[in-house]
Amino acid sequence: MLGTTFQRKLAHCIVFRAALSCRRSKSNRSLHFFPGENSDLRGDGAFRRNQPLGSTMELAYAGVLSFLRRNYTRNLQNVDVAVTGIPLDLATTYRPGTRFGPKGIREASTQLPDLKSYPGGIDLFEDLAVIDYGDCWFDASQPMTIPKAIENHAKEIIDRNVFLLSLGGDHYVSYPLLKAHAAKYGKQLSLLQFDAHCDTWPNPHEDSLNHGSMFYYAVREGLVDPNSSIQVGIRTFNDDFMGVKVLDASWVHGHSVDETVQEILGRIGNNPTYLTFDIDCLDPAFAPGTGTPVCGGLSTAQAIEIVRRLGSLNFIGMDIVEVSPPFDHASITSLAAATLAYQFLLLLRNKKILSKTFPFVAKSVQ
């Protein structure tokens, strides 16, 4: 009896999936927006798609793992956004495993492009050319060479006027990424940081790899302007926040999403802005798979609603870090990270539509 019931449910699922595919193929705004080769592809678009724009039909549980099923390539021609992984966890102070973060986020992302975005009903890739650039390579046996390797990896992308979205890796990776972006867009960048920790703790060893001190150095070196920077979700103590404004988790919980967004926008203004999202900004109930979880954080819903309202900011780069799949459950942390990155890409898509050009980021100093 149990087997019969299972078979009946399985048959219903197959019929529903087939009907859904049929409706998509008949729709004037189906998942296949481009004529020619791409419109006929079924599966593995990451290496079979012949251009960075457009979507292809995929099985969420099968095929090549690229972020959001985008082309897995190092060809930056006609590309708006490159997504890259930085699989580092040498700078952790508690639980390791963030070296598996990029792979985990990619795997969780495979279900997201199957349908148009909610609530807008937008196919992100009709208008925004996104690729998966693969991972930054470095020699883990030579840790002092890693920061420069990450910085150079970022530069080879952003120097081509391609927007960079990086997947960590522990939070230290933001430091060489900020160096690369400051070289392109000038120092005194605004930092928008979602985090449980301020990461401005002083460290006497300037060459150390530590995921709790990199913004201390970033402010001190002038990479970041503390007077136009803000941290959201903080719930750990520090004697000195280096002049960066803090909206701690208790404040966010006590105010509306719109009030939180207004504080962010008012602090940053139109300054070139780097967004870093440490997944431990979320409460462990929503993101258990991270290296240093802290109770009392934001919900995934809160974070998504805040990010959705940040479209007026002058973003020049983004990373999402500290996802540790070995400590995750049912991939909910990886899925949260992938979803937040997807929401950010929707912001970039909307900015491109409004500006009629890309890149639309701050003027380069080069």
Image (cartoon, helix red, strand yellow):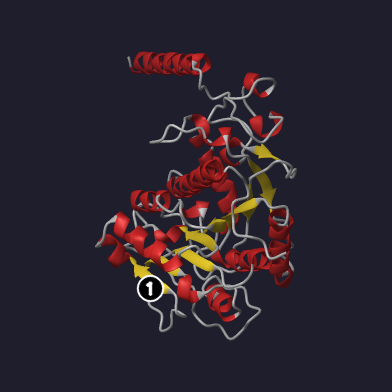
| Image quadrant assignment for residue 51 | top right
Residue 211 lies, in percent from the top left, at: 54, 70
In the image as oriented, which residue stretches furthest toward the left? Answer: 254
Question: Looking at the image, which is closer to me, 353 or 321?
Answer: 353
Name the image quarter holding the N terminus. Answer: top left
Q: Quadrant of the C terminus?
A: bottom right
Q: Is residue 128 left or right of residue 119?
A: right
- Mark 1 — residue? 236
Can you give x and y, in whole percent of width and height, for residue 23 in the image? 46, 15
Between residue 144 and residue 200, name the one nearer to us. 200
**Horizontal relation, residue 51 to residue 279: left or right:** right
Disc 1 secondary structure class: loop
The residue at the point 62 percent across, 73 percent down is 209
Q: Residue at x 44, y 48 (%)?
A: 336
In percent of the image, x 41 and y 48: which residue is there? 308
Q: Is residue 61 above or below residue 276?
A: above
Image x and y of residue 249, in percent:
33, 65
Relative side of 72 to 117, left or right: right
Mark 1 surroundings: few (<14), some (14-19) or many (≥20) residues within 10 A? few
Residue 329: image x %, image y %? Answer: 43, 47
